[in-house]
Image (spheres, coloured by chain):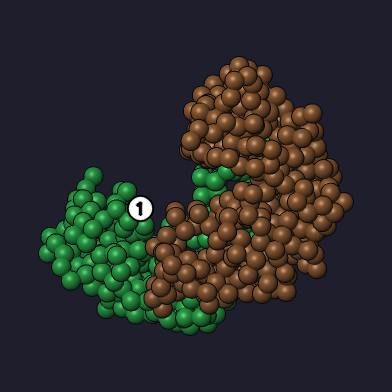
Chain colours: A green, B brown
């Protein structure tokens, strides 16, 4: 059955493009491709989008609201950062100047923090979605991923935030360092807890503890499932030690992919932090709905 | 002029093979190739060695003494680890069973530490060389590299040691992470000092400070030479924070490549640690000479 979109919500990251045919706040259909920002040149964005959404278009002009790296300098149109403290949607989304005449495409601005220098693109939309669903919520939102964000929210504003490269470090260490020989599939909860505890209490020991994974394999034949869980625990422990001023004694919401969010929530729980786990795609769509209301 | 070796010293690492034609403790000639352990199968070691040293052979049998990853399980012959505390050359080098009949090849054993689990192969020979040149020296030897080692030496024994993946992390972060866009050639001493100070005082902040390099580029157009120096400073600061129990108040010798050793020595100096810088190749050869004397 053919779907006709009232408007189209788009989550356009570095490696993925996801589109949702919308009627008000309801998702009618979705589609995705690997046409992320990283593999597109300026004139590739229009065709990549149309390839996904063309079947959803009614007669006339359909609005598209997009968030993520599509708004970076190397993206389709640069959507200048809003400076914190600010509402998570600090300004009207930016119109893409030349598009297929059946579309009006808007891009949500990212957020920046001058000191310590930090940036986000995409997560601000999830924060906006979370606040739209949970008005007057104060606390800390953790958005785990390649570059995990910790975001302090108060009075419907983003007060400050901090980005950790934990996910990218896990990928590089497990896939390309000497640890690749000692890190395999599977999971070992005890090894995870052990690694987490090590760097939570002595975060400076990370670089030495990392090599310990290799040495424990060579000397004590530690299984590669334990190696993987231990690596994850060590990296997350160091992140939780550094982000403690964010999460200690706060309301915490973890907004991310289900599996990774559970890992974060359980680790926080072990440290006395109670975190609600929230689906990130739902928050992205809620945030894009909120951004659309700014178009007027 | 043709050189004839009395014996041959070999430094055989993961990526490089270096051979030295020796007369007593004197180097007559040297040769090297990219036939490191990582690219050789079991039957490739013999031909790779012969290709480098054949011209140096006299009539009869010539002894070869080798150290490094050539003695790993995946190497030519496994030379079992000696357990610390121990002399840096804990046992007679291991004879390779089948070689060209003109050679007798011996491999120096590595060292292991049960708790915390750690291993070395190659550095023990440099430590042995350093102690042969500096008898009765007590203190800490730092061997910077892909996997930097901190080695506590007392009464001519290795008491304990710890390996840091700092060098490999620098290579992965600068070459393959999102930071590759913000890290380029050149150096900025102030940026290095700044990064070093950050993680020395707050080592847990490493993963967040790393992303700060990217954000400082995007927001404040930080030059990529500063990005590179800052990355190096952040990683080294975290290592010095963790290795402080090793180096604080101790005699320190840095045994490594000249440029990297100076970086370590200057960083230690900024923290009140005085380090002597010693050439690593010279120590390797001195250590292989010491190992040869164990052959009897």
Residue B163 location, x and y as percent?
68, 51
Q: Chain of mark 1?
A: A
* Residue sitting at the far front: B1
Residue B274 location, x and y as percent?
72, 69
For this rendering, which residue is in front, B50 or A12? B50
For this rendering, which residue is in front, A37 or A8? A37
- Can residue B144 be spotted in the picture? yes
State which quarter of the image contains the C terminus of chain B. Answer: top right
Q: Look at the picture and state if B70 lies above or below A45.
A: above
Q: Is residue A248 left or right of residue B156?
A: left
- Residue appearing at x 39%, y 76% in the figure: B221
The part of the image, by quadrant, that contains residue A252 is bottom right
Reading the image, the residue beneath label 1 is A16
Q: Look at the picture and state if A57 lies above or below B88.
A: below
Q: Residues within 10 Å of mark 1 (few under 14, many from 20)?
A: some
- Can residue A66 be spotted in the picture? no
- Residue appearing at x 71%, y 43% in the figure: B287
- Residue appearing at x 50%, y 54% in the figure: B171
Q: Is residue A42 left or right of residue A151?
A: left
């Amino acid at each position: 059955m053919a779907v006709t979109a009232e408007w189209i919500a788009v989550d356009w990251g570095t490696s993925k493009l996801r589109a949702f045919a919308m009627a008000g706040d309801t998702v009618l259909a979705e589609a995705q491709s690997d046409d992320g920002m990283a593999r597109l040149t300026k004139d590739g964005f229009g065709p990549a989008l149309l390839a996904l959404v063309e079947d959803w278009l009614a007669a006339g002009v359909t609005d598209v609201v997009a968030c993520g790296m599509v708004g970076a300098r190397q993206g389709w149109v640069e959507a200048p950062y809003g400076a914190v403290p600010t509402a998570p949607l600090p300004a009207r989304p930016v119109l893409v100047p030349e598009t297929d005449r059946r579309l009006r495409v808007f891009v949500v601005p990212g957020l920046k923090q001058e000191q310590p220098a930090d940036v986000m693109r995409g997560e601000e939309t999830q924060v906006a979605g979370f606040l739209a669903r949970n008005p007057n919520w104060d606390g800390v939102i953790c958005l785990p991923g390649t570059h995990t964000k910790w975001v302090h929210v108060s009075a419907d504003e983003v007060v400050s935030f901090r980005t950790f490269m934990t996910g990218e470090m896990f990928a590089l260490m497990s896939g390309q360092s000497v640890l690749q020989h000692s890190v395999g599939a599977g999971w070992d909860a005890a090894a995870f807890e052990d690694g987490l505890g090590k760097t939570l209490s002595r975060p400076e020991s990370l670089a030495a503890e990392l090599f310990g994974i290799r040495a424990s394999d060579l000397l004590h034949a530690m299984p590669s499932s334990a190696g993987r869980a231990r690596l994850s625990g060590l990296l997350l422990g160091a992140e939780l030690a550094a982000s403690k001023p964010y999460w200690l004694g706060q309301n915490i919401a973890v907004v991310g992919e289900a599996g990774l969010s559970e890992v974060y929530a359980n680790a926080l729980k072990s440290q006395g932090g109670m975190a609600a786990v929230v689906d990130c795609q739902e928050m992205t769509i809620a945030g894009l709905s909120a951004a659309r209301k700014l178009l007027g």
